[in-house]
Amino acid sequence: MIEVPSPLRLRLDRDALVANWRWLAARSGPAACGAAVKADGYGLGARAVMRHLAAAGCRDFFVATWAEAAALMPLPEGVSLSVLHGVGASDMVAARTLPVRPVLASLAQVARWREAGEGRPCDVMVDTGMNRLGLRVEEAMSGALDGLRIETLLSHLASADEDSDQNAGQLAAFRAVREAVLARRYSLANSAGICLGADYAFDLTRPGIALYGGTPRGEAEGHIRQVVYPETRILQVRDVPAGESVGYGATWTAPRASRVAVANMGYADGFLRCHAAAGGGASWQGRSLPLIGRVSMDLIAFDASDAGAISEGDWLALDYDLPQTAVRSGLSQYELLTGLGKRFARIWD
């Protein structure tokens, strides 16, 4: 098979990933610190993320679906994996076969697991205010979970990235459930929840976005390191006379005789038009290249007039600090990561 290099790559910093997990683990106090690796490790590659974090000491991982769980087999030794979306009727073959726990999220799922789970351990999600997945508090405390082998009882914070009264309300509700429902461990905090303090840590924390370079709250600023560095290869450098325009809709006109670098990336790769509208850019050998014109499906253009001897085949590093790019583009830090497409080669440094 002929190996064809990609004109797009994500340079991924393993040391930064591990350092982020270690900072979150320290903030978790005596609680274990797990890792959410759903959406293919937030777009970085779940198998590689799991390998790196397991080597650093992480033992608890979470995915969304059974297909994601199956893709991670076999698991590293000593690692546990849970499926956050629970177990539907069509999932039971996978649930019986894989060494993975479902996070039961409804009375129907609880009944299904009682009937067909063969007494195996499970996790349970209780809804303390998100109104998304999970048993309602009164359902969880009604005795419906009696007799289940619950490894971890979970809930999920809806507003942990804000200074909201909802956080304290959910904390109080989860404490009440903890007193009423027997489980080996209890878990409430995501990345932002870890930043809220020790009261939210319980026995296990479940960071996601902060592992990958996102800043969930101000407490994490200066501690979370960038992990993902998207790069694109230049297809062509062209001279554009003053007064001529670049790209669809003629949204940028050269104010002077300009050199324009056309690169191999576009909205099909998750680099959306709002990046251009918000003034994103790239760099080459320390020189800044403003993004110009309209982003198209798989081409973008940069003003390389002041970039020196830049040429076809050179690699450009995109400006992609997650908190800054989120503010600039209007996209969430989650969207910025998980939207990066499959045409990017994932390269761990």
Image (cartoon, rainbow, N blue to C red):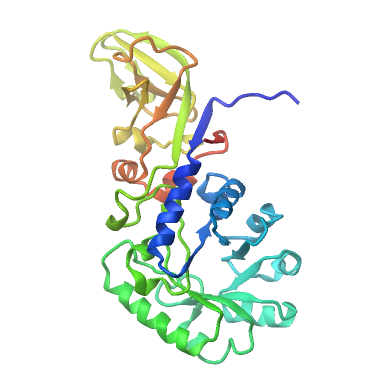
Work out whether 238 lies above or below 58: above
Work out whether 222 lies above or below 280: below
Spot occupied by residue 110 in the image (x, y as percentages of width and height): 62, 80
Pick the front one: 119 or 15: 15
Spot occupied by residue 142 in the image (x, y as percentages of width and height): 52, 92
Q: Residue furthest left?
A: 255
Pick the front one: 198 or 129: 198
The answer to whether any part of residue 266 appears in the image is no
Pick the front one: 163 or 89: 163
Pick the front one: 179 or 67: 179
The answer to whether any part of residue 109 appears in the image is yes
Q: Residue at x 49, y 28 (%)?
A: 298
Work out whether 113 lies above or below 143: above
Q: Residue at x 59, y 74 (%)?
A: 123
> Residue 86, located in which quarter of the rendered image?
bottom right
Spot occupied by residue 164 in the image (x, y as percentages of width and height): 27, 69
Quadrant for the N terminus, please: top right
Q: Residue at x 49, y 77 (%)?
A: 126
Spot occupied by residue 47 in the image (x, y as percentages of width and height): 62, 49
